[in-house]
Image (spheres, helix red, strand yellow):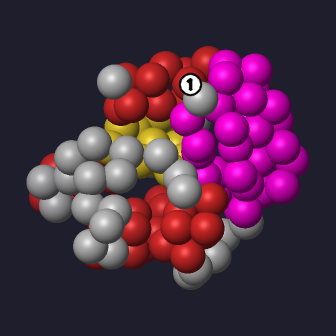
């Protein structure tokens, strides 16, 4: 069972996604948007992070924060975004690895497949 930290700035979406990912066998720890993302990764011993923020630049800032931590450079990250056309070039310019984009609208199954692919 993988341990997933879910950062979502919409509590209702976070709750639905938490249920969906738990049904897929993940242990989920949900939080609203926070600058303490690395503390939460360490606290919950997360195997992966899912970022779903209403603005891509919020997810981008959290992604950069996670990847700047020396122990999290290879931590799998799923970014859910309504602007994949902005996210993809941004991540390519960073040469980001172990990250997948799930475009909105999305299903829990899509996020689950992205996690499974990253955690292989």
- Nearest to the observer: residue 73 or residue 42: 42
Can you give x and y, in whole percent of width and height, for residue 83 in the image? 45, 47
- Compared to residue 19, the image places residue 79 above or below, namely below
Residue sitting at x 36%, y 38%: 100
Q: Is residue 76 magenta?
A: no
Considering the numbered disc 1 on the image, is that residue within a helix, a strand or a loop? helix
Q: Is residue 85 something one can see in this rendering?
A: no
Question: In the picture provided, is 118 more to the left or to the right than 74?
Answer: right
Residue sitting at x 54%, y 57%: 45
Residue sitting at x 73%, y 66%: 32
Tell me where residue 23 sits by quadrant.
Answer: top right
Q: How many marks?
A: 1
- Image: magenta residue range: 2-31
Q: Is residue 18 something one can see in this rendering?
A: yes
- Compared to residue 23, the image places residue 87 above or below, namely below
Q: Is residue 9 magenta?
A: yes
Label 1: which residue?
112
- Compared to residue 13, the image places residue 58 above or below, namely below
Can you give x and y, in whole percent of width and height, for residue 108 in the image? 66, 26
């Amino acid at each position: 069972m993988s341990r997933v930290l879910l950062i979502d700035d919409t509590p209702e979406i976070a709750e639905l996604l938490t249920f969906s990912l738990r049904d897929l066998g993940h242990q989920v720890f949900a939080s609203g948007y926070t600058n303490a993302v690395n503390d939460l990764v360490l606290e919950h011993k997360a195997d992966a992070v899912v970022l779903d923020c209403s603005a891509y630049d919020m997810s981008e800032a959290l992604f950069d924060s996670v990847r700047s931590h020396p122990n999290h450079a290879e931590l799998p990250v799923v970014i859910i975004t309504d602007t994949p056309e902005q996210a993809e070039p941004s991540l390519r310019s960073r040469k980001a690895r172990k990250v997948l984009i799930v475009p909105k609208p999305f299903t829990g199954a899509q996020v689950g497949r992205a996690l499974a692919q990253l955690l292989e």
